[in-house]
Amino acid sequence: MGNSAFGQDLPPVDSLKADSLRNSASMDKNKQNNVEQYDVADLIRQIIHPHSQPVGLKVKSGITYMPNVAYNPSIGAQIGIKAVAGKKLGGEESTLMSVAATSASITTKGIIYFYLSHNVFTPGNQWNLQGSLVAAKTVTPDFGMGIGEAKGGSEEDQALTNNDRTPYVLHGQFYNFREKVYRQIKDNLFVGAGVTFDIRRKIENRLTDEELTPYNIYSDRYGFERDHSSSNGLLFSIQYTTRDNQNRAYNGIYADAGVRMNQSWMGSSKNAVQITTDFRKYWSLSHRNPEHVIAFWNYGSYLISGALPYLELPGTGKDPSGRSGRGYTIAYFKGTKFFSSEVEYRFPITKNKFIGGVAFVNVQSANDDLQTRLFDYWQPGGGAGLRVLFNKATRTNLCIDYAIGKYGKRGLFLGLNESF
């Protein structure tokens, strides 16, 4: 689940990115490797039928049901159910399978989350439609604005930047509707446009009656209502991808650059222009065991003009998949400008690839409302984890990571698929 329960732009489901155009070719290329692999389905089959042999690669369609289980310090423990449906449109062999997904879940921290999403490819993959619908009861941890290194300022400034990282908790309701349409203009290159509506209602801090909380100070300073906000706008993006698999790439590049234009005529609380960048690169270190991978990820979000509601500020874990900055809770660091980079080494542990491991380090930077600019200070994090091969056909892993950061932050992060 990542951190999407706190109202991220999109739930981290089914990889709504256009790089799925390479998945079918990737499956054929790795078929021999997959026959030798052992996943959860093989384990269950051998428990039921002890003398059966692991099966090779099978690409299934139709509807799949699975438990939606996750854990991280932001959401607590999560339990729910998820369903994924797939169907190929048209008769062209090259057309990619269109998918839809839905999930309902509840967590130990009082979060209730429902989403419905789709990723549809028209015949020949000429058009790609991506969208989501979210309704949630959210519980959002808040540690103030900035990177935790503010200097000087008034009493309000110090409360807003919250150098001591005093924890606050914001309760509320979150509703999201997003739809984007991509057009392939050249091999591996797509352009897209769409709309997004991020609506929050009944926002309140139930644990304190303080007036000088980061949320109150920011909302009053920039003219936002304390109990509700809307961030509605137009989306424009360009995307380039050569990744061999969207769930767990061994090789390739993924790059996306987008512009979001929040518009008051669409019901947004304020006008704003925001630029986001997402770059990922993968190097396989072995032909015989391509699971040995060095992976690099950089995510950035930059407010160019206008103002964003406090809960929509970019920050830790506020990327679309909600997985950046492991070692810290969601939005632990945030500002109008945010930058995060991460390097991870992935490797198999068992010969049949059923168990694997990772080691990772990350850094983050953010500005604040005083004199701290982006890149003035960096906050590190890192850790290691285990991987259990859940589905060898799609390279889906169950991920169990333990990560640490500064300020005594540490925790266990559990989810499906790699962080990037």
Image: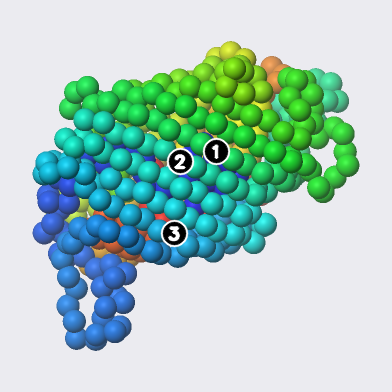
**What secondary structure is marked by label 1?**
strand
Of the image marks 2 and 1, the number of the one nearer the N terminus? 2
Residue drawn at 85 percent across, 45 percent down? 208
- Callout 2 amino acid: Ser
Report x, y in % for residue 80: 52, 62
Q: State the CA–CA distance, disc 3 to disc 1.
A: 19 Å
Q: Which residue bears the numbered disc 1?
A: 176
* Lower position in the chain sequence, tag 3 or tag 2: 3
Farthest-out residue, front: 90
**Left/right of residue 310 with respect to residue 287 in the rendered view:** right
- Answer yes or no: do the residues labelled 3 and 1 have beta carbons within 8 Å? no
Residue 325 sits above or below residue 126 on the image = below
Using the rendered image of the protein, determine whether residue 353 is visible from the camera's viewpoint.
Answer: yes
Residue underneath mark 2: 132
Q: Residue at x 66, y 37 (%)?
A: 200
Decide if residue 284 is in sight here.
Answer: no
How far across and down, in percent of the image, does residue 316 sit? Answer: 56, 38
Which quadrant does the C terminus fall into? top left
- Percent x, y of residue 311: 65, 34
| Image marks 2 and 1: residues in contact by CB distance under 8 Å | yes
Residue 336 placement: quadrant? top right
For residue 82, the mark is 3
